[in-house]
Image: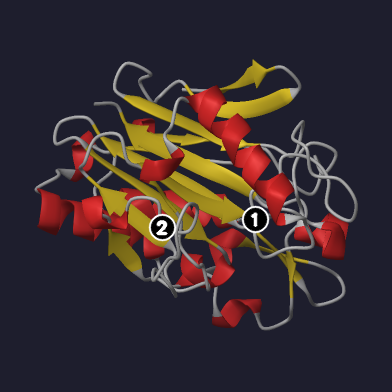
């Protein structure tokens, strides 16, 4: 298992070798390339940041060409750090990109319908892609620290299992670039939210937190094999020259996307 860079002109995506290109199109975007300029630059995919809408739409056109997705069949959600997950149907195609979306307070998307691209956004939070090749089911999840504590990744596995008859041992997971344990400093109340094994206490009484490790353990607790979980290990803060990072860029932060689509 490993991640590798997939380059299109000046744009760079991360892909996992765990995810078969024969069955799905997937990728974790970066901030490199794109047409956004001004307060937010690069391949920004967020409509709700300080960027020109026309530039964001042009970035989506580049993404569409690079990863082979149809924007008319792409689905976005308004993320609010919940553990809410939407089962996406044909009726949702284009929501959030080519037409208005009613998918609000939602941080995960699941479908078993080919040629529908699911996208979640991040700028330090943890993006997670799921694929069950046996049942033909995909999911994209945004897991910030609140979503991680709420175990949104476990909820995703439950829906895949209960609604789509997936078996956890068949599910493949790619955990993309996010703030790492090297940079995620949390307050003195960290023990109220995180188990001790995900903490490193600092002399100032604050803590460094390892979200990817916590998510990985949450997934194995649901029956997913450790060998079926690929963690990029890329810290968006340490690599803020390549990725959007709210901690590093503040008001100049765009959004990268985690994209997955079943090939038809």
Q: Which mark is residue 55?
A: none
| Element type where label 1 sits in the image | loop
Q: Is residue 254 visible?
A: yes
Q: Is residue 89 visible?
A: no
Q: Is residue 207 left or right of residue 57?
A: right
Against 224, residue 48 (above or below) is below
Q: Quadrant of the C terminus?
A: top left
Q: Which circle's residue, 1 or 2, is located before the other in the chain?
A: 1
Against 79, residue 140 (above or below) is above
Q: What residue sits 57% from the left and 54% below the top?
A: 121
- Look at mark 1 in the image and give the residue it sits on: 46
Alpha carbons under labels 1 and 2: distance apart: 14 Å
- Look at mark 2 in the image and give the residue it sits on: 95
Q: What residue sits 26% from the left and 38% below the top?
A: 171
Mark 1 or 2: in front is 2
Against 10, residue 171 (above or below) is below
Mark 2 crowdedness (10 Å alpha carbons): few <14, some 14-19, many ≥20: some
Q: Report the front residue among 192 and 89.
A: 89
Q: What residue sits 66% from the left and 39% below the top?
A: 59
Against 46, residue 194 (above or below) is below
């Amino acid at each position: 298992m490993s991640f590798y860079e997939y380059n299109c002109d000046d744009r760079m995506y991360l892909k996992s070798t765990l995810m078969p290109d024969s069955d799905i199109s997937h990728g974790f975007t970066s901030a490199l390339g794109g047409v956004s300029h001004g307060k937010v630059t690069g391949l920004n995919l967020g409509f709700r940041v300080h960027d020109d809408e026309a530039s964001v739409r042009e970035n989506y056109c580049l993404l569409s060409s690079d990863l082979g997705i149809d924007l008319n069949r792409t689905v976005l959600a308004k993320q609010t750090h919940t553990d809410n997950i939407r089962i996406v149907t044909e009726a949702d195609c284009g929501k959030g990109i080519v037409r208005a979306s009613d998918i609000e307070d939602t941080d995960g998307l699941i479908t078993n319908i080919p040629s529908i691209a699911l996208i979640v956004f991040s700028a330090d939070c943890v993006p997670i892609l799921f694929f069950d090749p046996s049942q033909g089911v995909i999911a994209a999840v945004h897991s910030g620290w609140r979503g991680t504590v709420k175990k949104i990744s476990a909820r995703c596995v439950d829906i895949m299992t209960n609604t789509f008859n997936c078996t956890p041992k068949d599910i493949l997971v790619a955990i993309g670039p996010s703030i790492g344990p090297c940079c995620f400093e949390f307050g003195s109340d960290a023990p109220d939210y995180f188990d001790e094994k995900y903490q490193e206490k600092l002399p100032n009484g604050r803590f460094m937190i390892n979200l990817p490790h916590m998510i990985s353990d949450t997934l194995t607790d649901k029956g997913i094999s450790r060998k079926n979980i690929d963690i990029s290990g890329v810290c968006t803060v340490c690599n803020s020259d390549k990725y959007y990072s709210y901690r590093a860029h503040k008001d100049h932060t765009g959004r990268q996307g985690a994209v997955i689509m079943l090939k038809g």
